[in-house]
Amino acid sequence: MSNTDSEPKTKSDVYRDRNLLALAFITAYTEVRACPEFGWWPDTDDVNGESWAVVWVNLPMGQVGWHIRREDVPDAMPKRDPEYDGYTTAEKNDRLQRYVDAVMEVVYGE
């Protein structure tokens, strides 16, 4: 991707950025925490087929996950059934916000 922040980005560029952010978050979280449950699982949605996967991690606030291209899943990431708890995107985002707020409180007292 050769775009700077001031240049227009394609939809593919934006998704690539987002996919890497999801992977970076899971990697950083699992590095700091002592082996939380995390991994990837083939997307079972018939619309997305075999070309997509779900990467996921269980936070103290609940499970969060993202659909990413199967080719972006790192070889070292374990393939594990997430036992999906049925969260919606809104619930996932709420869990992420509560996690960020909790970490900020602990680290910065804010």
Image: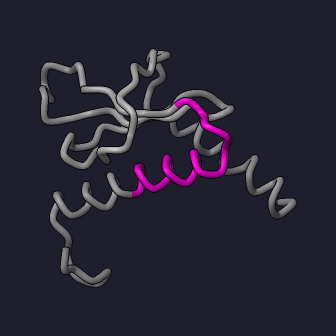
**Based on the displayed image, in which of its 4 quarters is residue 99 positioned?**
top right
Percent of width and height locating residue 75: 29, 44
Principal secondary structure, stretch drawn in magenta: helix
Magenta span has 28? Answer: yes
Percent of width and height locating residue 73: 29, 44
**Based on the displayed image, in which of its 4 quarters is residue 61 positioned?**
top right
Q: Is residue 8 above or below residue 50?
A: below
**Based on the displayed image, in which of its 4 quarters is residue 67 positioned?**
top left
Residue at image coords 25%, 26%: 42
Query: Number of labelled discs?
Result: 0
Q: For this view, does 75 lie left or right of residue 62? A: left
Residue at image coords 17%, 58%: 11
What is the residue that sits farthest to the right in this orientation? 109
Q: For this view, does 110 lie left or right of residue 90? A: right
Percent of width and height locating residue 7: 22, 82
| Magenta region | 21-37
Residue at image coords 24%, 26%: 43
Q: For this view, does 106 lie left or right of residue 16? A: right
Q: Nearer the viewer, residue 15 or 31?
A: 31
Q: Is residue 73 above or below residue 50?
A: below
Q: For this view, does 98 lie left or right of residue 65? A: right
Q: Nearer the viewer, residue 3 or 41?
A: 41
Model colouring: one colour
Magenta span has 75? Answer: no
Percent of width and height locating residue 41: 32, 27
Q: Nearer the viewer, residue 70 or 67?
A: 70
Residue at image coords 19%, 80%: 2
What is the residue that sits farthest to the front in this orientation? 76
Dividing the image into 4 quarters, which one contains the N terminus?
A: bottom left
Dividing the image into 4 quarters, which one contains the C terminus?
A: bottom right
Q: Is residue 24 above or below residue 58?
A: below
